Amino acid sequence: MTTTESTPEDESAGESDRSDTDGRAVAGGQPPTRVPEGAEPQVCPYCGFELPADDQYRLHLGLNHYEQLDDGDQAAFRETYQQEEESLTRFRIIALGGLVGLYFGFLLIYAVLAT
């Protein structure tokens, strides 16, 4: 082993033993996911990671295995990624509007109570 390589023990020395909700170790550093009872999980053909929804499955494939995908799967990933980005942008705008409204609400209450 060269000096630039590290063992898994070295990388997780400061971390607690990561496991999912069933107590099983999480493979490949992926966060644990929950698949609803009775639902058929989508399983990644490259790493075996289980995902509960089709959009999450496509995002996982594109973000972690893009080079291994064919053109159709890459196009599906880009479309799903764009939809997710639009949803996040909408959420951020709504959250910012809520925070601004909350700020001015508190400012108005302060102005009324301070007089």
Image (cartoon, rainbow, N blue to C red):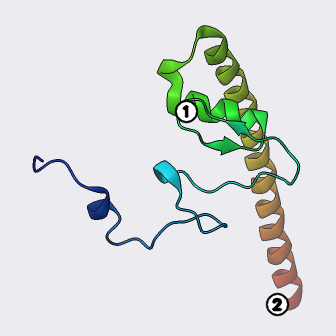
- Residue under the point 25% across and 55% down: 7
Above or below, 68 against 56 in this view is: above
The percent coordinates of residue 4 (x first, y second) are 15, 48
Marks 2 and 1, Cα distance to the nearest angstrom? 53 Å
Q: Is residue 21 at least partly visible in the picture? A: yes
Q: Amino acid at mark 1?
A: Leu
Quadrant in the picture for residue 73: top right
Above or below, 65 against 99 in this view is: above
14 sits to left or right of 40: left
The percent coordinates of residue 64 (x first, y second) are 52, 33
- Residue under the point 84% across and 53% down: 36
3 sits to left or right of 56: left
In the rendered structure, find residue 114 and report the number of the disc placed on it. Answer: 2
Disc 1 element: helix
- Residue under the point 77% across and 33% down: 54
The residue pinned by badge 1 equals 63
102 sits to left or right of 14: right
Residue, far left: 2
The percent coordinates of residue 66 (x first, y second) are 52, 23
